[in-house]
Amino acid sequence: MTTPVITQRFPGRSVLVTGAGTGFGAEIAFRAAQEGARVGVHYRSSKDGAEKTAERIRAIGGEAVLIQGDITDWDDIKRMADESFRAFGGLDVLINNVGDVARDQMSWRDITEDSIDHVLEVDIKGTLLCVHEFGARMLDQGHGNIVNIGSTVVVRGSARAPQYAAAKYGIIGLTKSYAAAFAPTVRVNVFAPGFIETEATLKRDDWKSGRGDKLRSLTPMARIPGPAELAGAALFLATDDAAHMTGGFMVADGGYNMIGA
């Protein structure tokens, strides 16, 4: 892995990242600040994590605002959107990072109705409502970019957690729908990482007992990246260089799936 050159793609712009207290969301928020953005750090219940992310941003001279809310609650999302636009005098970018991967489920045989309901509620309903409310306000202000964090699980499905694969397919559908509805004023795209070695992933029993090594051996790039390495790629879809991209699905998986025409 080479050390990335941090360019200033978001000077003076505002970026809200949902689920920015830990993992991938925290790294996207920090990278946005490194690139000049004023950052909204969203959290639901992990305030300590969100404050740590904000502290990292402020330590490099950046601006961070904490935004609390439950993305499965429509009224909460409306409030979050209002607070974000008020805090920054508008909002340039929304990164919908929050999602549930049913991490504790090791087999399709272990699926429960509660897990199905929860994953679909968080991943599909929550993402859809965030796009709906933040996107409507972006339309009113005359510009905006939304990036929904998807997954390459849509390529192969998931024998472990079918509800997770179904939810990520749903994100593609809602992304295309709102991209068409909001064009040409607001762009909406999906960034789909492959496997990421977050702290939570590294702690999983299956990862420690050989799954990580197997996946590395099947990946042409021969490694699984940490979340910081992919943060810049996720933000690319919200940059001016991606100005002609909407309704798209961009993959960063080290070649594991080799998606293409």
Image: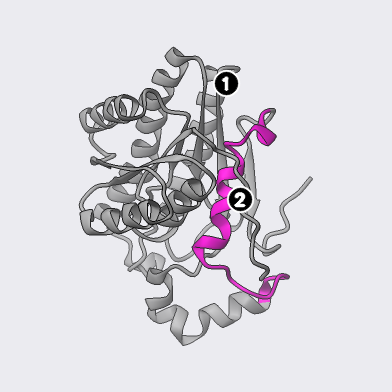
Q: Residue at x 62, y 41 (%)?
A: 249
CA distance separating discs 2 and 1: 23 Å
- Name the side, left or right, on which 78 lies relative to 259: left
Element at badge 2?
helix
Residue 52 x/y as whole percent: 30, 59
Three-letter code, disc 2 = Ala
Look at the image and give the residue range highlighted in magenta. Answer: 218-243
Where in the figure is residue 139, as x and y percent of width and height? 46, 16
Residue shown at 43% from the left, 13% from the top: 140
Q: Which residue is mark 2?
A: 233
Is 190 on the left-hand or right-hand side of 33? right
In the image, residue 141 sits, relative to residue 25, either above or below, namely above
- Can you tell which quarter of the image residue 89 is in? top left
Q: Mark 1 — residue?
A: 180
150 or 236, which lies in front? 236
Image quadrant containing the C terminus: top right
Can I make out residue 194 in this image?
A: no
